[in-house]
């Protein structure tokens, strides 16, 4: 088994510190098997896509390093550098398990998820709870969910009020689910984000 492989998304260039390593261009499945450590050169949605594949493949034993060209929401949450500093740390850093937040479809998030109004409506109508705490009941403009490094693992927000917990559940008349900037193709009446029982191995 080789030690380190690089997954590059979009038109991004391989950072100089990673030159000479095996490179895959967004072929996630091809990169899962051969390496102990994967370096993700892309954005938050790309990192989330890789974690989703690792989760579904039962390969959360693979170390994952994140080397985005610039700071992102995930780099702030996980306290990571960007650019060349991130590439150097991807090679020299140590991996430790951190919170993996996913939804009921098995899709991971690393920066932010959102429940947004569907069908050109101005509000979401429904109710949501974080563990045993009511987040809202009625109409709200939007709900946002983020992973946290600290337990219990995630937090959710309506307006400016954050509530921390292990899981957040929504029942509604219909919402658009957005994961790290990518909107789901179909609306949903119910949606849940929660801390997976096993974290992912983040190189820091």
Image: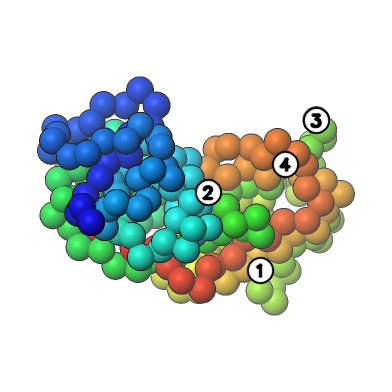
Q: Is residue 201 left or right of residue 84?
A: right
Image: 77 above or below 25 = below
Disc 2 marks which residue? 112
Q: Nearer the viewer, residue 82 or 203?
A: 203
Residue 130 numbered tag: 1
Q: Nearer the viewer, residue 31 or 89?
A: 31
Are the residues tagged 2 and 4 within 8 Å (C-beta)? no
Q: Quadrant of the N terminus?
A: bottom left
Per the image, label 4 sits on a secondary structure element best described as: strand
Image: 103 above or below 177 = below
Disc 4 marks which residue? 176
- x 53%, y 68%: residue: 196
Are the residues tagged 3 and 1 within 8 Å (C-beta)? no
Label 4 or label 1, whichever comes before in sequence order:
1
Q: Quadrant of the C terminus?
A: bottom left
Quadrant assignment, res 126:
bottom right
Are the residues tagged 3 and 2 within 8 Å (C-beta)? no
- Distance CA(mark 2)–CA(mark 1): 16 Å
Residue 120 numbered tag: 3
| Relative image position of residue 95 (x, y in whole percent) | 25, 63
Label 3 or label 2, whichever comes before in sequence order:
2
């Amino acid at each position: 088994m080789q030690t380190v492989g690089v997954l590059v998304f979009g038109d991004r260039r391989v950072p100089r510190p990673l030159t000479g390593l095996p490179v895959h261009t967004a072929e996630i499945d091809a990169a899962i098997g051969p390496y102990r450590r994967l370096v993700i050169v892309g954005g938050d949605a790309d990192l989330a896509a890789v974690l989703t594949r690792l989760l579904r493949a039962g390969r959360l034993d693979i170390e994952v390093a994140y080397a985005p060209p610039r700071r992102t929401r995930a780099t702030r949450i996980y306290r990571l550098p960007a650019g060349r500093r991130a590439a150097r740390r991807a090679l020299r850093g140590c991996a430790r398990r951190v919170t993996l937040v996913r939804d009921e479809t098995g899709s991971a998030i690393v920066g932010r998820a959102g429940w947004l109004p569907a069908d050109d409506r101005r509000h979401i109508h429904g109710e949501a709870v974080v563990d045993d705490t009511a987040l809202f009941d009625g109409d709200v403009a939007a709900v946002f969910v983020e992973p946290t490094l600290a337990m219990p693992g995630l937090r959710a927000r309506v307006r400016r009020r954050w509530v921390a917990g292990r899981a957040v559940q929504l029942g509604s008349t219909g919402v658009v689910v957005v994961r790290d900037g990518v909107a789901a193709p179909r609306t949903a009446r119910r949606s849940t984000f929660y801390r997976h029982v096993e974290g992912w191995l983040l190189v820091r």
